[in-house]
Image (cartoon, grey):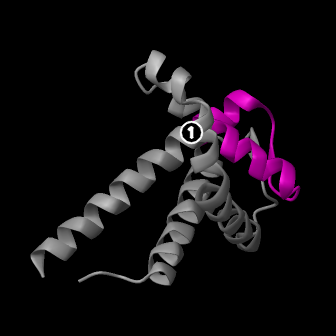
Amino acid sequence: MKHNLIYRFLVRWLVCSLGLWIAAGLLNSHITYNNRLTVIIVAGLVLAIINAVLRPIIIILSLPAILLTLGLFMIVINGFMVFLVSKLYTQLHITGFWTAIFAGVIIGFVNYLVSAILEMRETKN
C-alpha cells in the first residue's frame, strides 16, 4: 500500500526525533536538550524539514566529493544537517562538528533500522 506524502513525512519526523533522542542519550556529555522531550520533538521536526528541503540541494552540489570518496562524504553531509539544526534551534546544543557527525551516523542507523522494519511489515501484508 502506497502511503501519502504526509504519512511519509510524519514517519521521517518520528525517526529523526527518535534518532536525536538516542544520539543525545549516547553522547550525553556533548548533546544537551535540558531533558525535555519537546526539545527533541521540535528538533526532529526541524531536522526532517531540513532533510526534505536542503539536503537534496547539498547532495547535488557535493556530488563530486561524494563520488570521489565512494559515498563516505554523505557522513559529513548528515553531520552538517544535524549541526545546522543545533544552530537553527538553539535549545538543542551540540558541542562541536564531530559530535554532530557521530549524531548523524546514529540517526542514519536508526533511520535504516526503522525503514527496514516498516518495509518488512509492508511486504508481510
User: What secondary structure is marked by label 1?
Assistant: helix
Residue 29 lies in the magenta stretch: no
Quadrant including the C terminus: bottom left
Residue under circle 1?
60
Q: Residue at x 56, y 39 (%)?
A: 60
Q: Compared to 82, does 91 lie above or below?
A: below
Q: Residue at x 61, y 58 (%)?
A: 21
Q: Judge whether residue 28 can be spotted in this image.
A: no
* Residue 2 in the image, given as x and y percentages of width and height: 29, 81
* Residue 6 in the image, given as x and y percentages of width and height: 51, 82
- Residue 31 is drawn in which quadrant? top right
- Residue 47 is drawn in which quadrant? bottom right
The span shown in magenta is: 79-103
Q: Residue at x 41, y 83 (%)?
A: 4
Q: Residue at x 85, y 48 (%)?
A: 87
Q: Compared to 29, does 2 lie above or below?
A: below
* Residue 63 in the image, given as x and y percentages of width and height: 53, 30
* Residue 7 in the image, given as x and y percentages of width and height: 46, 82
Q: Judge whether residue 7 can be spotted in this image.
A: yes
Residue 114 versus residue 60: which sits nearer the camera?
Answer: 60
Number of numbered discs overlaid on the protein picture: 1
